[in-house]
Image (spheres, rainbow, N blue to C red):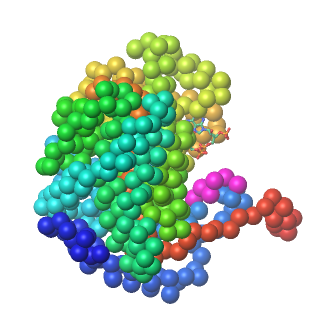
Amino acid sequence: MLSSLLRTPFATMHKRLVDLLPETRDRLAKIRRGHGNKVLGPITVEQIIGGMRGIKGLLTQTSRLDAFKGIKFRGLSLPECQIRLPSVRREPIPEAMFYLLITGEVPSNDEAEDLKKDIAERAQTFPNYVEKIVNSLSKDLHPMSQLSIGVLALQNESEFAQAIRRGEKRGNLWQSALEDSLNLISRIPKLAAMIYVNKYRDGKLGEIRENADLSENFCRMMGYHDEKFWELMRLYLTIHCDHEGGNVSAHTTHLVGSALSDPYLSYSAGLNGLAGPLHGLANQECLRFILGMKEAIGESPSEIDIEKYLKDTLAKGFVIPGYGHAVLRVTDPRFVCQMEFAQRYMPNDVLCKLVASLYKVAPRVLKDLGKVSNPYPNVDAHSGALLTHFGMTEYDFYTVLFGVSRAIGVCASFVWSRALALPIIRPASVTMENLEEFVRKT
Ligand code: HAX
């Protein structure tokens, strides 16, 4: 198996992972052996009823979310990633981000380049039968459903599933998990681009280049040739990739993977969670919201007009998409990065200006409701306006872009979960009667 892992000329990331494994396993074993029965935090009745907010119950190596500082990928904030990771123009290449998430180390330019070549090479090998399946899907089917179906069709290629079938030792499963992950990350852009050109264009895919990064190739396949759009996609693919372990898409992928389902089955399940409006689908809802607001109150509304529009929306029982978060208690740094991108490249864009105007008013309106834990914008509040600027106006495709990015984070975590031989996830649940009995006794 290792020989197939090392089939690329350099494969430095694989070698680095092999070096890191014993030490990391040892660290975990020491914690478990010496401190396994220590209590990390209480669990309240409210947490059981309220979606397990704040309960620390998952081990995730790749990233950590701080409510006030935002996401850190292996200890690096977004601005630090932008400065330190190998990039094209200003934004890190997605391959460098995957290297960081897998190894915990910033790759050198050569290391990132090796991985880039490996991924571009794997992208060339897309199974014909999957192409046929995807091409046969109804254009009316939501792009996220198409993506999930396409990933399930790719599952036929899973080396992890074969390893399970031939009884591979648990401790070795990370190898086929990594192989599947690299194939998945390489092929997902083509799958997504097929869905895009089938649904919105003439069905013809653009060509990919061997020396281009994943972002450029993804954009080329969808028919976008503007370097600034490739740069936006680089930003997009890196900031959406991971958000620690508890969000619905990462958690679902991890949960399904804990049953030793392969990376395709697990990630496809995660995608189905991402497709929910309270999670990844919020990015399409945000653009719909901004366009609706523009239609209703014009291109440069006053703060009073915006406030009234927001209050009317809330009164009708809708949420303000792109605002609020289950963990964050400040403006999402991923929103800030996108706002900076807009200011740098498109300061006069009408939709981006509307996003900025909304940001001045919405937190106040949401705070006034008195129940919203976080009245500030999240990652989804800006992306649609930026994509629209470059002509990608088909907002029901936006969550697919999120899905392409999320593959990078959930696959890195999948590899580590198998490398650390984490067990099947099986928390306990209580009934209402259990809770009532508990309440009576306390
Ligand atoms: N607009 C209106 N009401 C909101 C709100 C918003 N943006 N955010 C929260 N609330 C409401 C909740 O609906 C809830 O109301 P009820 O008690 O009447 O049910 C109340 O405020 C308390 O909720 P919360 O504690 O602030 O938020 P949760 O942790 O329960 O939920 C959500 C977090 C992100 C789901 C929520 O803020 C929301 O629905 N936001 C809008 C949708 C959105 O932007 N989702 C994307 C989130 C980021 C992400 O995952 N991207 O993929």
Q: Is residue 365 above or below residue 70?
A: above
Q: Nearer the viewer, residue 13 or 87?
A: 13
- Quarter of the image with the N terminus is bottom left
Q: Is residue 396 above or below residue 96?
A: above
Residue at 70% over, 55% down = 49
Residue at 41% over, 43% down = 133
Is there any visible trace of residue 301 in the rendered image? no
Residue 186 location (% of width, % of height) = 29, 53
Is there any visible trace of residue 43 in the rendered image? yes
Q: Nearer the viewer, residue 173 or 124?
A: 124
Q: Quadrant of ligand 1?
A: top right
Q: Which residues are magenta?
A: 49-54
Residue 226 location (% of width, % of height) = 19, 31
Q: Quadrant of residue 340?
A: top left
Side (left or right) of 211 relative to 38: left
Q: Indicate yes or no whether the magenta region holds residue 423.
A: no
Residue 164 location (% of width, % of height) = 45, 73
Residue at 65% over, 28% down = 317
Residue at 37% over, 22% down = 351
Residue 56 location (% of width, % of height) = 55, 65
Q: Quadrant of residue 397?
A: top left
Q: Residue furthest bottom?
A: 34
- Quarter of the image with the C terminus is bottom right
Q: Is residue 126 above or below residue 285?
A: below
Main SS, magenta region, reads loop
